[in-house]
Image: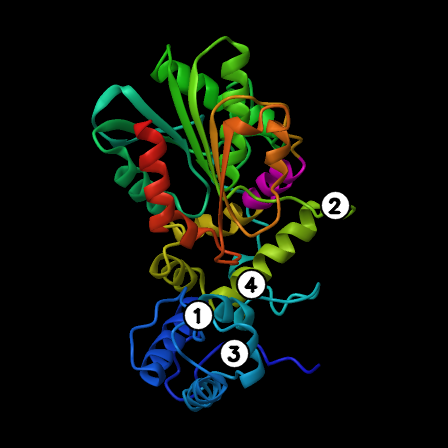
Amino acid sequence: MRRSPAVHSNPRNRIPFTCQAVERLLCEIGGARLGRAVSPYDDFFELGGDSLSIIGIATAARERGLPVRSSEVLRFPVPARLAEHLTLPRGTAPRVRPHALDADAAPPAVDGVRVLPVADGREDGLLCVVHSQSHVLAERNAVASWAQGRAAVGLSLPGAGGPVSTDGTGVTDGEPTVAEAAERCLAALLAHRPTGPYRLAGFGHGAVVAFETAHRLRRLGADVALLALIAPPAGPAPGETAAGLDELLTGRLATLAGRFALTGDEDIEDIHARFHDAGWYEDVDRPQDLPGLQRAWARIDRAVREYDYPPYDGTAVLVADGPTPHPAERAWSEAPERLTVHRLDLGLASSLPVIGDPRVGDLMRKVLEA
């Protein structure tokens, strides 16, 4: 079946058709056709649309410069899912490697794990969160909304800005492992709070590191009252060979090119601005750091996708986007009643909507009150 061309720019208004811009356009057009407000996660059919409405939405989108067929809107009637379908690469061949993000540059230097205050409150109810690499500010805002009078701190993800030596001598070129990252988080956490109980959470790659940190705390005899894993990567499918570093990096750059409508001609300042506008890398102040951060991301991604979750029987919550079991669930095979799995139906490649999903906020406030 013939595929739509890559969605890069609106020839009429010369506005880049980023994934976020496509989302907004589809919500606007859908709202006009259906006579009601449409959010990125609404289903056109569930809002009262029919096949004629879908054809009208596709026609109006093409009139606005978005190359989309009616059949694609029928298959993906949720604006956020359709936007990813239209902008992210499909198959193995990337559409473009943006030159300004070609990650041959060294990552910025990192010295240990930063402990970032998130919310003031009761120290006996302290919540400690291991951040991801790309959405630190969105995660901090989410955690602050969960806190409800308890203190909360965030730990920077070890290796997120580049590999760090384990002996404190500075940056190394070694490949990170989840065990090494967790050892660094454990040291920072114990320095900040020497005794439990501990309530740990993590986002994305940070969720996997939080799991290993909790596992190590329990081996030390510490009380881990709660572990929350928010959108950890699922890892390779059964029987699928784990991707190598170069393959992960190539895929990452192609995905960013599609999501942010990058043609390869942008300078790094333009890319930095597009990232910030969409809520990505908002804590990164220097545009020149972005290329090296992509190689750091690929290293972390490979480490967490190769991680084998050891048995765990503590109280935990797993938030996953999709209907299939997550590899982490196997850790609770001997104590399934201690794990609460909350599955979302967003079906998106980005974890950013999961971070701010009100259902996740309600769940976390509930389990933190328990």
Do residues under tags 3 and 1 come within 8 Å of each other at their CB atoms?
no
Residue 160, how many percent across, how many down?
49, 38
Q: Which mark is residue 73?
A: 3
The answer to which of 312 and 19 lies nearer the viewer is: 312
**In terms of secondary structure, where does tag 1 sit?**
loop
- Earlier in the chain: of badge 4 and badge 2, it is 4
Magenta span: predominant SS is helix
Q: Which mark is residue 249?
A: none
Do residues under tags 1 and 2 come within 8 Å of each other at their CB atoms?
no
The answer to which of 323 and 241 lies nearer the viewer is: 323
Q: Nearer the viewer, mark 4 or mark 3?
A: 3
Q: Which mark is residue 238?
A: 2
* Residue beneath disc 4: 99
- Earlier in the chain: of badge 3 and badge 2, it is 3
> What amino acid type should be assigned to the residue bearing mark 4?
His
Please state the extent of the stretch shown in magenta in the rendering: 296-306
Magenta span includes 43: no
Left or right of 55, for residue 15: left
The answer to which of 320 and 108 lies nearer the viewer is: 320
Density class for disc 3 (Cα within 10 Å; few <14, some 14-19, many ≥20) is: many
Compared with residue 129, is residue 59 higher up or lower down, i.e. above or below? Answer: below
Q: Nearer the viewer, mark 1 or mark 2?
A: 1
Real-space Cα distance between discs 4 and 3?
32 Å
> What amino acid type should be assigned to the residue bearing mark 3?
Val
- Earlier in the chain: of badge 1 and badge 2, it is 1
Q: Which mark is residue 43?
A: 1
Magenta span includes 301: yes
> What amino acid type should be assigned to the residue bearing mark 2?
Pro
- Earlier in the chain: of badge 1 and badge 4, it is 1
